[in-house]
Amino acid sequence: MLDRNYIRNNPNLVKAGAEKKNVQAPIDEWIECDIEHRSTLRELESIRAELNSSAKKIGQLMAEGKKEEAENAKSATKELKEKQTDIEEKSKTLEEKVQQLELQIPNIPQSVVPEGTSEAENKVIKTWGEKPEITNAQAHWDIASNLGLLDMQRASKISGSGFALYTNWGAKLQRALINFLIEHQTNNRGYTEVYPPVLVRRECLVNTGSLPKFEGDFYELKDDDLYLIPTSEVPLTSLYANEIIPTNQLTMKMTAISSCFRREAGAAGKDTRGLQRLHQFDKVELFKYTKPEDSDEELDLLREDAESALEALGLHYRSLLLCGGEMGFSNVRQYDLEIWSPAMEKYLEISSCSNFGDFQARRANIRFRRDAASKPEFVHTLNGSGLATPRLFAVLIETYQNEDGSINVPKVLQPYLKTEIINPTNELVTN
RNA sequence: GGAGAGAUGGCUGAGUGGUCGAAAGCGCCCGCCUGCUAAGUGGGUAAGGAUUUUCAUCCUUCCCGGGUUCGAAUCCCGGUCUCUCCGCCA
């Protein structure tokens, strides 16, 4: 969420920000509620001050043994207490309303973010490699089916549509990708690995800004009041909730592999064939807590960390600076990485890297202290995918397919798969 | 799942109805002192909020939510989490 004083002092900037993101935000309503809330609060506090001082006085009278006077003072507080109860309730209701409204106000995009509401306004900031020339390129679902890498029928038998079953070399390739991606980021890029739970409390999703805005997008276990995470950004953001991080630990860089779960309600039928869109998938996440002044630079570095994994795999990609209307709710700047599918002849989103400023840190109350004498400040949070495996899997086998139906294994994956090629003859894996 | 113990500031930890936003120690900050270092010594040191009294005043906060009371860290009820033991289990 945004700083309340900031909204009060800059309502027009907040409105312009929401507009740039193409989000309807109840800013005027918030301002109105906030004013009313504060005036109620003032009234409440003055009543409390009065009650506090008379309680103190009664204590003194009791200590001095002036019982009668004390009793008189006691009965005199009755009326004030009733008034307090009333106003307390009013103030609480207003506070809840202010909170509920401010959760609906998005973060403000930075000035470098292009105006726009559609893909067309996204800005390509980098292109790496070239579209591979493949004659009669086969789609990943055909390659996978021929080589026995995926069994989508049986996956839907056990879980319904939108789930993948990796088999044989497919399962091995999936695991190789995970290991490669994690080890790349920890060994070469300075990230510390963590392995978080995939079931989290509701407040974790509120901290990232996923809720209440996107109610219904996530799997919820109602009996236990837990949610399946849509991304490990969710547990990682709350890792240091309500803590003050020692300054010398910033910038803190973490990476995590986790399964991610998304209901994708309403998305059925649209660009979903094969591995393009799943209810469950694995993703390596890159995550940072930074000082405010470092976050812009750290976002670029984080994006380069994600890009470097694609480069190591030799996959053609492009990086986009998203326009306001395409951005997420909580971020101030967002880059998307897209990889080229030679068979589908389109770019697929493989990573999304964002700087959230102090928006999530304020919700989660994550702070740091510059030095012993200074007040705690909110950290900045950043995250990005590094990378999501199903689309990576899909593009990888499409890019490295041979005319005879086999797949060349990129060099960096060979140590994990212990083969240079996957073809119909190396059928069962026994090692 | 059953039984018990606990949750206090950056940390350790005392506090069982008013003198407690909270002892003491550690850490940290500012002095003093001692050839240097170490030690010693004096003082300071929670967060959030409201207020055009802003080097100030007031409010809230001792896990969370209720309750009792003029008054709650302290008493009562409900919840969460942690630890120990038992059970179950990959």
Image (spheres, helix red, strand yellow):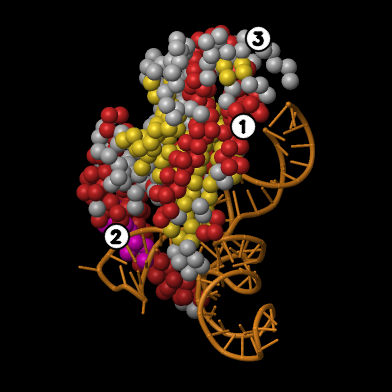
How far separated are the C-alphas under marks 2 and 1? 60 Å
From the viewer's side, name the closer residue of A423 and A293: A423
**Mark positioned earlier in the residue sequence (2 or 1):** 2
Left or right: A135 as drawn, with respect to A25: right
Left or right: A133 as drawn, with respect to B81: left
Contact flag, marks 1 and 3 (Cβ < 8 Å): no
Q: Residues within 10 Å of mark 3 (few under 14, many from 20)?
A: few
Q: Position of residue A228 (x, y in %)?
A: 52, 30
Q: Amino acid at mark 2?
A: Glu
Q: Position of residue B13 (x, y in %)?
A: 67, 63
Mark 3, secondary structure of its residue = loop
The residue under label 1 is A179
How far separated are the C-alphas under marks 2 and 3? 81 Å
Q: Amino acid at mark 3?
A: Thr
Nearer to us: label 2 or label 1: 1
The residue under label 3 is A425
The residue under label 2 is A43
